[in-house]
Image (tube, rainbow, N blue to C red):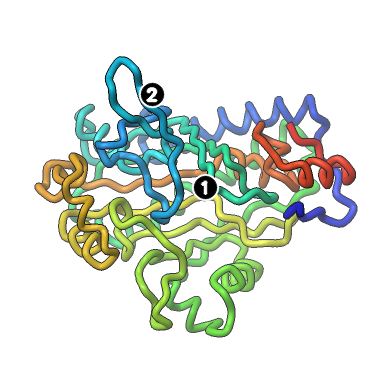
Amino acid sequence: MSKTFVPENYKSTLDLYNTQKAISLIKRVFEDTLSSQLHLQRVSAPLFVEATTGLNDDLSGVERAVSFDIKETDTSAQVVHSLAKWKRLALHNYGFLPGHGLYTDMNAIRRDEEMDNIHSIYVDQWDWEKVIDQEKRNVDYLKKTVQKIIESICQTQSTMRIIFPQLSVLPPISREITFVTTQELEDLYPNLTAKERENTFVKEHPTTFLMQIGDQLKSGKPHDHRAPDYDDWTLNGDILLWNPVLETAFEISSMGIRVDAAALDRQLRISGCDNRREFMFHKMLLAGELPLTMGGGIGQSRLCMLILGSAHIGEVQVSVWDEDTKKTCSENGITLL
């Protein structure tokens, strides 16, 4: 059965030709704006990494990577889920200084991802990472960085509304950010699920940064799962924006200040992942050989959906869909690329 939600009286704001033009422009404008705001340099990124390095992002720890063997090297490789750990090693190898960082045009395959309006097995995002000093490992610096990302998003939307006046029918993204922790959200809505809490809160606070994701709450459960070896669970969060077309909280970015040796040690231990200490990346981090960093991923297709008012992620990216989804979209004027 299709999981596609069809908004009442939905019609794409732009025709197919102009949608393609707009997607290209959104990506160029946002890249330029974000790199200027955060002092980032674009670098080339891998599509796959060797499985034994421990560099692949394990997401919540249960997703299966797409793996294949390499004839010439007699090794196994994995298509990346994201580049959370690779970026930190790249900053070390390239010699980036504090206050400066990199971003990549990241493409991934997540074979176990569900398929609905906002999820696809193909993931395209801007993965970014920057070097920071010890004194920047705090909530205030995290919040200031979130403000710069929101400003980049809003500037991109403003540019697109000038070039494509049709997009002005959509409400502007709010620059006013509400910061809230997962525990505060649970305290507010103890009888709701994590997703229900997000929807209820973000509807009233349309630009929200939800902080401290990964650790257990008072209820004994985490708000959501996070891998133990990239974000510091006390210094991370999701940027959630209200999507007026889908009428739901819309995650545009997962980000945070990364683990230092102490946070990695703690999070590996409490998550039962001590075996990862033998990987090259983890050994270097525990030994203090990698720089302190912060970073995240910003969904390219998600941002395009929001700015263009698209109802389905398949309207802004090419992927594979089940027959029910294709039928539902075709019958309701949703054109999948």
Query: In this picture, is 34 found above or below 119?
Result: above
Residue at x-position 49% and y-position 32%: 107
Query: In this picture, is 134 found above or below 103?
Result: below
Residue with the most extreme top position = 72
How far separated are the C-alphas under marks 2 and 1?
Answer: 25 Å
Q: Secondary structure at mark 1?
A: helix
Q: Splitting the image into 4 quarters, where does residue 212 fall?
A: bottom left
Residue under pointer 1: 151
Q: Quadrant of the C terminus?
A: top right
Query: In this picture, is 231 found above or below 35?
Result: below
Judge by depth and name the residue closer to the eye, 281 or 26. 281
Residue 199: percent from left, percent from top? 63, 68
Q: Residues within 10 Å of mark 1 (few under 14, many from 20)?
A: some
Image-based side of 58 in relation to 263, left or right: right
Image-based side of 87 in relation to 104, left or right: left
Residue at x-position 69% and y-position 30%: 22
Amino acid at pointer 1? Glu
Residue 54: percent from left, percent from top? 27, 41
Residue with the most extreme left position = 287
Image-based side of 164 in relation to 265, left or right: right
Amino acid at pointer 2? Ser
Residue under pointer 2: 44
Q: Secondary structure at mark 2?
A: loop
